[in-house]
Image (tube, helix red, strand yellow):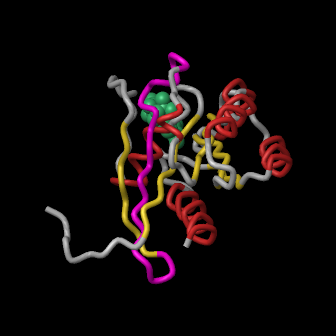
Amino acid sequence: YGDYSQKIDYVFKVVLIGDSAVGKTQLLARFARNQFSLDSKATIGVEFQTKTLIIDNKTVKSQIWDTAGQERYRAVTSAYYRGAVGAMLVYDMTKRQSFDHMVRWLEELRGHADQNIVIMLIGNKSDLASLRAVPMEDAEEFAQRENLFFMETSALESTNVETCFLTILTEIYRIHA
Ligand code: GDP
């Protein structure tokens, strides 16, 4: 299994953070395997998935970490952040509270992660437009103030998922390659 002739030029670790149930696991499933499930997962414990892509003719292996439920117990540890060069701060655009908590997640991230980590703010579940609780302008303003990339996604409809991972990985490549 796997193509051993493939030379990996870079491995980049990216962590997903944000409140429980905002869609972190489904964003990762969509990006890594093009899958989506309406059921929440039951498993607890840190997990990551990898996806290899070509950026600027180089083979870049992305290693995307999912909290896998740890955030429910405020148990995301420093080991989770260790070595991360990118972070995706995910909120649910139909849940105002999950956006308000971004301040805390950002604080925790900046307390644990590398100085020049690339951070992207993600408003997920854009398919539920009629239930929107976070105006795009609020998120844009926050992102601008905190110097984050920002995008709205739908893991369900596959909107912007590929784009947001590509954007963060390309920026990471620009900084680290
Ligand atoms: P996590 O706890 O942040 O990892 O969240 P999950 O990925 O487990 O998703 C929580 C729930 O939201 C599940 O029922 C998912 O099916 C659902 N969900 C995730 N992404 C989307 C999305 O883009 N749109 C909609 N409508 N539901 C989503």
Q: Quadrant of the N terminus?
A: bottom left
Q: Quadrant of the C terminus?
A: bottom right
Q: Residue at x 43, y 54 (%)?
A: 31
Q: How many marks?
A: 0
Furthest toward the left, the residue is 1
Which quadrant of the structure image shows residue 45? Answer: top left
x, y percentage for residue 81?
A: 53, 40
x, y percentage for residue 134?
A: 75, 35
Q: What range of the chain is rendered magenta? A: 55-74
Look at the picture and state if 71 lies above or below 82. above
Residue 58 shown left or right of residue 143 in the figure: left
Residue 49 shown left or right of residue 147 in the figure: left
Residue 116 or residue 46, whichever sits in front: 116
Residue 45 shown left or right of residue 121 in the figure: left
Furthest toward the top, the residue is 73
Is 65 magenta? The answer is yes
Q: Residue at x 30, y 75 (%)?
A: 7
x, y percentage for residue 150?
A: 70, 52
Look at the picture and state if 16 lies above or below 100. below
Residue 15 or residue 133, whichever sits in front: 15
x, y percentage for residue 131?
A: 67, 32
Is 35 magenta? The answer is no
Residue 67 shown left or right of residue 176 in the figure: left
Q: Residue at x 37, y 59 (%)?
A: 51
Residue 156 or residue 145, whichever sits in front: 145
Q: Residue at x 59, y 60 (%)?
A: 168
